[in-house]
Amino acid sequence: MRQDLLPYGRQTVDAQDVKAVVDVLRSDWLTTGPTVGAFEERFAELAGTAFAVSVSNGTAALHAAMYALDVTEGDEVIVPCMTFAASANAVVFQGGTPVFADVRPDTLLIDSDDVAAKISDRTRAVVAVDYTGHPCDYDRLRAVTNGLDLPLVSDACHAVGGSYKSRPVGSLGDLSAFSFHPVKHLTTGEGGMITTDDAELAARMRRFRNHGIRTDHRERAEKGSWHYEMIDLGYNYRLTDIQAALGISQLEKLPAFVARRREIAARYDRAFEGVAEVEPLSVSQDVNHAYHLYVIQLRLDLLTVDRSVIFDALRAEGIGVNVHYIPVHLHPYYRDHFGTRSGDCPVAEAAYERLLTLPLFPSMSDEDTDSVIQAVEKVVASYRR
Ligand SMILES: *Cc1c(COP(=O)(O)O)cnc(C)c1O
């Protein structure tokens, strides 16, 4: 179908982005300067939160969130298994134990009933992952967590620009984590952010990203400007001004990026209405989907081959399909260290066998999109039962 491989995701960087980065490179501040603060302010505005704390990547954002909530050895944190490993790894960094919740079969989003079933007296927090860019059902999750006073962390790495019941992604969890990896909606090369309305949590995360050093300017002024205190063990998880400049420039284009992603998704939706072997994930009426990924589930009962044959055939057609995700509890690390096994999350495990991610990024043309549709139709037709 295509000579060149159409990737499943790709950044969009223009001359304005390049200029923004070059301007910072010529300035006095390459890191811990004013551009970082400006990026945080604009991001908080977009999320509708009081605070946004930038960090060096999305994994660091999740780690900072776990630290802020004081997750520690012996604590359990409920995480959906249908996600990138980092959502669970952040719990482990703090010495905690991820407890994997299953997902709903139509959206593959965390199942609040399974969350309720897996809460124990050691549960310290719940992580909701807005998988593919579809915000989770936060009201239902709150109904489970609020009575128990459990904080809700939103792993919103797929969902910037989306909303749930007209509330913006970023304002839905007590803490919401974002990634600016090039494959995500907006990029800073590597980068991350946590949004929150809680001043104390924000202050803890600012300290955490900077070696655990207290940034009390008044105290510094009183005791001498050389004076600082490291009061807890932290990391160097800072974002640079170079990255923040790119982030601000990218943020201006976010509405257009998301709009284009929705257009492409709508084109896929229309085309696959007529293809019985292809089931796109369901979308709730009460969300604005940010469409980081366009995921389909294959109807294997209507096909003569398994997903891997379809995957290889689409790759041979030049379509850069992918699979998101291998359920995290099936990775050898979690099996070996946490005793997880197949059967723990039956819905996600069954879904995994038939998942495919189709290419989706803002600079894809309608012709690119149609080449994906035609390749899917061709491959499916040749393996139709
Ligand atoms: C990308 C991603 C992360 C990690 O972000 P990085 O910036 O790559 O560290 C975490 N969770 C989810 C769901 C992601 O998609």
Image (spheres, helix red, strand yellow):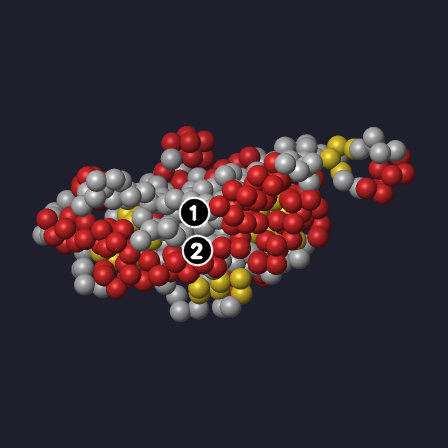
| Above or below, 71 relative to 361 | above
Q: Position of residue 234 (x, y in %)?
A: 66, 34
Choose between 58 and 315: the one closer to the eye: 315
Q: What element carries label 2?
A: helix
Residue shown at the point (53%, 36%) measured from the top left: 92
The amino acid on which the numbered mark 2 sits, given as a three-letter code, is Phe
Dots 1, 2 in contact, CB < 8 A? yes
Residue shown at the point (51%, 38%) measured from the top left: 190
| Above or below, 54 relative to 138 | above
How packed mark 1 is, by other alpha carbons closer than 10 Å (few <14, some 14-19, many 20 or more), is some
Numbered label attached to residue 257: 2
Q: Tell me, yes or no, if residue 26 can be seen here.
A: yes
The amino acid on which the numbered mark 1 sits, given as a three-letter code, is Thr
Earlier residue among tags 1 and 2: 1
Asked if the residue at label 1 sits under 8 Å from ligand 1, the reply is: no
Residue shown at the point (54%, 49%) measured from the top left: 249
Judging by the rendered image, the residue that carries numbered circle 1 is 12
Q: Where is residue 337 in the image (x, y as percent from the top left)?
A: 45, 31
Residue found at the very far right of the displayed protein? 222
Asked if the residue at label 2 sits under 8 Å from ligand 1, the reply is: no
How packed mark 2 is, by other alpha carbons closer than 10 Å (few <14, some 14-19, many 20 or more), is many
Q: Where is residue 246 in the image (x, y as percent from the top left)?
A: 55, 44
Determine whether, in the image, residue 212 is placed left or right of residue 2.
Answer: right
Residue shown at the point (25%, 40%) measured from the top left: 4
Q: Is mark 1 on a helix, strand or loop?
A: loop
Residue 55 occupies which quadrant of the picture? Answer: top right
Numbered label attached to residue 89: none
Quadrant of the frame with the N terminus = top left
Choose between 65 and 133: the one closer to the eye: 133
Determine whether, in the image, residue 330 is placed left or right of residue 69.
Answer: left
| Above or below, 46 relative to 337 | below
Q: Position of residue 276 (x, y in %)?
A: 18, 60
